[in-house]
Amino acid sequence: MSAAQLVRPLLFASRSVPRQFRGVGKPNLHRIVMASSADASHPAPNTPKKRPHGDRPQHRFKRAKKDLKTRFEGTHEDVLLADVWDLLANTTLEDAKVGASANEKDTEAARAVSSEPKTADAAPSSLPEKWSEIELPITSLSCTGDGLALTRLSDGTPHVYVVPFTLPGDVVVAKVVRHTAAPIPSSSSREMQPIRYTVTDFVRVVAPSPQRDGALVKCKYFAACSGCQLQMLDYGAQLAHKRTVVERAFARFSGLDTKKEVPVVGDTVASPLEYRYRTKLTPHFDGPPGRKQSDGRKGIVRGWGGQVPPIGFMRKGTRQTIDIEECPIGTEAVEKGMRRERDRVARDIEKYKRGATLLCRESTRRVAKYEWEKEKEQRAKSVEVKREWEDEVVEDRGEFVHVKSCVTDSNAETIEYVDDNVFSNTAGAFFQNNNSILPVFTQYIRDNALGPLEASSASNEDGTNLPNPCTNVPSTALFNLIDAYSGSGLFTITLSSLFSHSIGIDISPASIRSANRNAHELNKLSPSRASFQTADAAALFESLPDNVKGDNSAVVIDPPRKGCDEGFLRQLAGFAPRRVVYVSCNVATQARDVGVLVKGIEGEEVGSRYMIESLRGFDFFPQTGHVEGVCVLTRREKGEAESG
Ligand SMILES: C[S@@+](CC[C@H](N)C(=O)[O-])C[C@H]1O[C@@H](n2cnc3c(N)ncnc32)[C@H](O)[C@@H]1O
């Protein structure tokens, strides 16, 4: 059974779902996180028994909060599980040895592969004890950005360890954090079988992979902070890895035949900035520690005791916050803002009763150069030197300067430019976090929103049967853009030159308020050219005007990480737009949803089926494991072959 077969039955569990995704038996997505004996014949018990503290066995059983998931959600654990499964199913230990040798002939890595893990303190079971340190050869890089090591346990069972901050070919020492078992349906029966792997902390490199280059690491918190785990990997190799992340997502989670139905995944489009790209950071601190009342009364006293807590991000694999003074992926303005926020919290800590998340978000003021010179003269003459001037970062943009500052009030307005389009948002609302890639990204969507056979009708609202500008073949023009999950109108506005009318929909009233202001006031689109609604995306199709038909429309979809819900996909398939551009920050759920659009909804005579025209990633988050997927789909016309 492949990872794709493993996951397909788990995609949808409810009865109303496409039959293609209904599972082998009843999908049971208990996430049982356990430190267990490695004996697969004894699945983990579901209910842990409480024992006195000193009497706890080292194998604790923990049940995930959310016991029953009804639909594959593309979580970090789901994606990791598919990687572990593929590694166990498709790589023999000998293969792993060959792989490591190919990378690094006759190195420690090659010698160490397929050797037993060396445990510092051997556990009675064949799994190493929790918190013991073991030496591991890294076999592959997972889609979550973690290294995976395939070795044998002392009883000979192949076993996978997840080791963050590592690369294929590394030999490392790692500390065992927890043993995990996720039940999956067995191929031979309707029962669930646990698939096991071990999560570890990275301790040190014993023999480096040829791909590892410590000189590339720019952050002093590397290998402690949970972000940016790929810093030791050359940027070109990061982009190549992310291409495989898109490939693996579509191979595993789309349910499609990758040879016939999924095109070759394009190269990942690089971010112009590899560091200093993030326009928003949200460091946090935890609440004050509790201590017992000194006079013996019941209850806990909470206070800071004169201590400033660590302010920063999570330590990898824990819920512990580590103090982060600087973050090299934040823009310069954001980093200055973060320093000032840290100082403010340190001064005001006694005002906080509990922990908090701080917001640091960049805002840009575009000023004509001659005006900026005048403003500088005024400032030089002023007796008062404003604090915010000190934190500004000024960038030369030809005729203009961009004066960048950091906003920390979540209700305040922020401004961003994408080419000459201007976007205003409340600082706490969603907007893409890497401004440097947005011009190339939005240009790509513009280039792909219309297919080679579709004509633009932006200046021609009645323009049916326009000649196609490329082929001169008459075709129906695409009048309408539907921007589902529109946020504050990024696609509506940047694609407006192609369409005579655009409709955006988003569930957030704040985003729709911004979208209206952005379209009509700041980018001068008339209300007849762009309109927005606050609603669930699934409500979109009920409210479309009669003249908006699938035949004259393109739809851009950019949902949150969990992807589109089934109701939305069903209605989209029924509406049958000629083009669909699906943008996503989670390629696993994107692949799941695209699979539904390509295959149609089995057993239901609903809607049109689509072909994937192109598929590639955009690197919105260099140094991290994340990739933004862009999948362009075109409607299959009647009579077109089902496959290919
Ligand atoms: C990834 S953001 C994309 C926003 C926008 N396309 C952009 O690039 O700026 C996802 C958006 O989906 C919205 N959203 C989440 N669930 C939704 C739902 N059920 N219906 C409509 N919008 C939703 C969020 O408010 C958010 O603005």
Image (cartoon, rainbow, N blue to C red):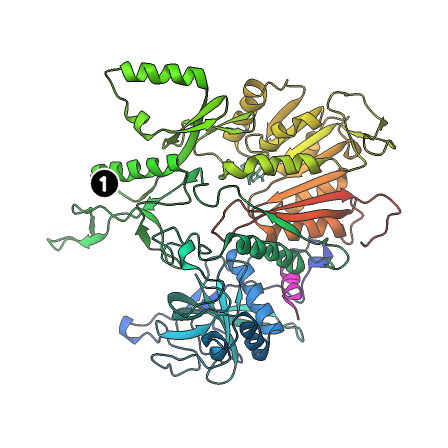
State the image coordinates of residue 196 (x, y, percent, origin top left).
Answer: 51, 72
Query: Mark 1: which amino acid?
Result: Ala
Residue at 20% x, 40% y: name it: 350
Q: Could you say which is closer to the camera, residue 209 or residue 529?
A: 209
Quarter holding the C terminus?
Answer: bottom right
How many labels were placed on the picture? 1
Q: Is the magenta stretch mostly helix, strand or loop?
A: helix
Percent x, y of residue 512: 55, 28
Residue 88 image-quadrant placement: bottom right
Which residue is disc 1 drawn over?
A: 346
Q: Vertically, is 297 above or below 423?
A: below
Q: Does the magenta-highlighted stretch encompass residue 7?
A: yes
**Label 1 CB less than 8 angstroms from ligand 1:** no
- The magenta-colored residue range is 1-11
Measured along the vertical axis of the image, is residue 235 above or below residue 487? Answer: below
Check residue 61 for magenta coloring: no
For the residue pair 227 and 41, the one nearer the viewer reads as 227
| Residue located farthest toward the bottom when viewing the structure as drawn | 155
Q: Residue at x 55, y 64 (%)?
A: 81
Image position, residue 233 (x, y; %): 48, 57
Residue 25 appears in the figure: yes
Residue located at (78% from left, 47% from top) = 609
For this rendering, which residue is in front, 328 or 250?
Answer: 328
| Residue appearing at x 65%, y 72% in the figure | 190
Q: Is mark 1 on a helix, strand or loop?
A: helix
- Tell whether 290 sits left or right of 423: left
